[in-house]
Amino acid sequence: MQLIWLRSDLRLHDNTALSAAAARGPTVAVYLLSPAQWREHDDAPCKVDFWLRNLSQLSRELGELNIPLLIRTASRWDDAPQVVFDLCQQLKIDAVHVNEEYGIHESRRDEAVADKLKAGGIDFHSYLDQLLFKPGTVLTKTGTYFQVFSQFRKVCYDRLHRSLPSLVTAPMAQAPLNIASDEVPANVEGFETPGESLRVLWPAGEAEARRRLDTFADVQIDYYKNERDFPAKPGTSQLSAYLAAGVISPRQCLHAALQSNQGEFESGKVGAVTWINELLWREFYKHILVGYPRVSRHRAFRPETEALAWRDAPEELLAWQQARTGLPIIDAAMRQLLETGWMHNRLRMVVAMFLTKNLLIDWREGERFFMRHLIDGDLAANNGGWQWSSSTGTDSAPYFRIFNPLSQSEKFDTEGVFIKHWLPELAGLNKKDLHNPANLGGLFGVAGYPSPIVNLSTSRARALAAFKNLPSRQSVGAGDE
């Protein structure tokens, strides 16, 4: 008997470990609920709800193949070795199959489980699945992990040209086992169920993920390069939550993009090429987790930036968290996050730069707040994005490049459609005043909207001074973007 231990791979199709297990013989699936660990990792309630909804859907689909899904609890991952071992003994399991996960805690958990099983004579097989390339196989000429995305991408392209990762066939139905599936819980204590409006935005299941991918690849991908920066336009794939939970695989995404681009990586449709690059950014940040474990430990990728004199400004942090900064594009973006569990990628950069540069608040505060609210929360991508914006990470924005929220707003939400949607109290303003109601002077206080909590130019100067004082810093360069 084989056991597939499901984690962030909640799908039937193109699931390497599931197909490998089923090919070896009768298979049972298990999922571990780990609420204490999820809390420690700042997983958002809407994300936990999304996992459970997808798990419930997957349970039905596995049931049609006569593969029972069992639910066990290992509140912390330290409990996982015993819980998995006990289940294996109970079911007389010969081998456990998993898809690799990345990050210090994930790696330690899997090593501990493997050791416990092997000591009991049970095999443990792990497979490359949530990445296109195994970490440690895309390295510089000196054998180190890449620190610059463009160089990493070039090697990935070379490898993809030579050998494209193929899709894995879904398992066939097996003979029924005398084992009943467990009911997937509708919720987990400590993680409140989100409102129905958020759930409607993110339907569960592989069919929905596939529908989004097909719609995007058939229609939207052509406009992706030009429209992805405009938050009021449906310019992105809306697949990040499904990728994070493994409801769809990066291989499926890559194949769909290539199919829409006649098999080309670097030529043809610029939209398809740009989107493939985004898949590779996701890949890059996972490789960084493995190659530079300190980023899993809340440490800056660039060690010299650990010396930054971040400000302790709890009221400003709270205003940012509650969408009360007085800068409409920032507040609209934060409301989008709070209400939908998701934020447009351009705005993730804008609000992150505002927090870390204009407010000079530690990037870790923003990283944690995002994880606690994102339905697509992913340690590698979230950490990579925050460290990029705060100039502490790989490929980071030069510290003197500080997005100006007003010019970003005017450039990417020119007509104010996004702002008016999320800040209806400002809907009566013309598009000139909408981006910066503070310009209205005496009339200020529109519908109780707050005045800006910070002066953009003086706060920019303060950030430049703080970064300039770090060791090994270059002279100041260009201005705002």
Image (cartoon, rainbow, N blue to C red):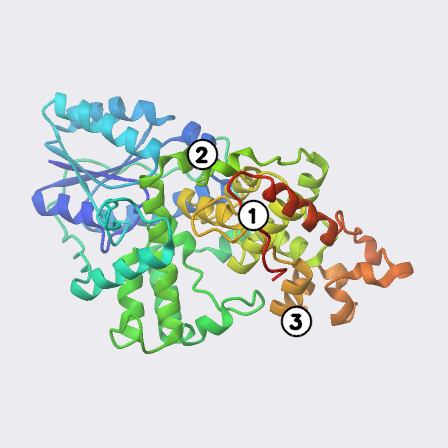
Q: Are marks 2 and 3 in contact (CB under 8 Å)?
A: no
Q: Amino acid at mark 1?
A: Gly
Is residue 427 visible to us here?
no
Q: Gap in Å between the C-alphas at discs 1 and 3?
A: 31 Å
Task: Report x, y in % for residue 251.
Answer: 26, 59
Badge 3 amino acid = Thr
Viewport quadrant of the C terminus = bottom right
Amino acid found under the numbered disc labelled 2: His
Would you name the residue on which mark 2 appears? 41
Q: CA distance from mark 2 to mark 3?
A: 37 Å
Q: Give the SS element for disc 1.
A: loop
Answer above or below: position of 457 versus 314: below
Q: Quadrant of residue 158?
A: bottom left
Q: Is tag 1's residue or tag 2's residue first in the polypeptide sequence? A: 2
Question: Does the image show residue 278?
Answer: yes
Q: Position of residue 260 (x, y in %)?
A: 31, 75
Q: How far apart are labels 1 and 2 at the CA level? A: 22 Å
Q: Nearer the viewer, residue 77 or 472?
A: 472
In the image, what residue occupies the spot 62% across and 35% down? 309
Disc number lying in front (1 or 3): 3
Q: Position of residue 411 (x, y in %)?
A: 63, 69
Give the side of residue 60 with respect to residue 350, left or right: left
* C-beta proximity under 8 Å, tags 1 and 2: no
Residue drawn 38% across and 26% down? 75
